[in-house]
Image (spheres, rainbow, N blue to C red):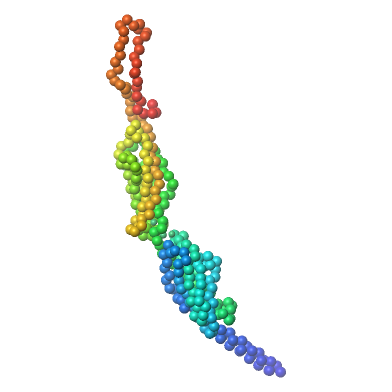
Amino acid sequence: MRQVYRLLLFILGNLECSSSQSIQQPRWNNDISDLHEIPENLPLDSKLATISATGLNGVDVILITYGTETERRVSFNYTKGINAVGTVYLKEEMDREEMSTWELYFKAYDSKIGPDQVREEKLTIYITDVNDNAPKFTAPFYQEEVPENALKGYIVTAITASDPDNGNGGRFSLRLESAHLYQAAFNISQKVVDGKTVGTVTLKRELDYEILSFYQYLIIATDKDPDIPLSSNVTLVIKVKDIQDSPPYFQGLPYVTEIDENVHIDHVSISNLSRIYPSINI
Ligand SMILES: [Ca+2]
Ligand SMILES: [Ca+2]
Ligand SMILES: [Ca+2]
């Protein structure tokens, strides 16, 4: 009796083993090493990729996405069949500067056997750069003061800016722009320091507080994208600091007046005599 019982267990064990061996998970037809390079400005609802899986048990295969990030980023539909084919569409805007690679996850399972026997697949999307950022200044506004006796070459200020795009779209030039003729008073040069572009504003000619005490420019940064260059600007105000550099002088010289010869000495008066003080801090 014990031998019969052992024989029965042996047969049942073999049956179970052969049953599990006959169930095969669907086979993905994609190579996960395939490069999926997508430009970051791809419009929403555009097709990102096609994936497919083949059922090995003679029944239809079901495809699904899984993972909150995948579900947020893409929409997905597929044609059911032994060879199920799915299309992945863009649902969330891409931004290479924020994240340059997306990993999307899918599952394939046999329609009769159910999701317990699934085959997972990861689809990697490499997001390629588009020139979609104008250069950015580190400050929203610049204001400086320069003494009026400053010499040519005096450094007024140094500004920093950056552009996160790649290649020419990430390189840019700086220039000063003004609607007035005094533009020639200052210039800007630039160099890269520790990966950041630094613009240095210097004095180009002598200043005179009594002639002009206030300058205003736009610093314009334009990237070097050959097709669609992007620009941004920031205001630079330069105030000239007054220096005691002018002696007082008389205005309306020479002064002429008439005095009656018999006037009393205590009543002599001279009118319209005035001095001009060119500097305000006298
Ligand atoms: Ca971007
Ligand atoms: Ca970009
Ligand atoms: Ca750019």
To which quarter of the image does residue 12 belong? bottom right
Q: Is residue 149 visible?
A: no
Using the rendered image of the protein, determine whether residue 268 is visible from the camera's viewpoint: yes
State the image coordinates of residue 85 (x, y, percent, origin top left).
Answer: 48, 76
The relative height of residue 184 versus residue 85 in the rendered view (above or below) is: above
- Residue at 59 percent across and 86 percent down: it is 19
| 17 horizontally vs 190: left or right | right
Quadrant in which the C terminus is drawn: top left
Position of residue 203 in the picture relative to residue 116 (left or right)? left
Identify which residue, 84 or 145, lies in the foreground: 84
| Location of residue 224 (image quadrant) | bottom left
Question: Residue 182 appears at what percent x and percent y?
Answer: 32, 39
Question: To which quarter of the image does residue 129 belong?
Answer: bottom left
Q: In the image, what residue occupies the spot 42% across and 62% down?
A: 41
Name the foreground residue: 147 vs 60: 60
Q: Residue at x 31, y 22 (%)?
A: 251
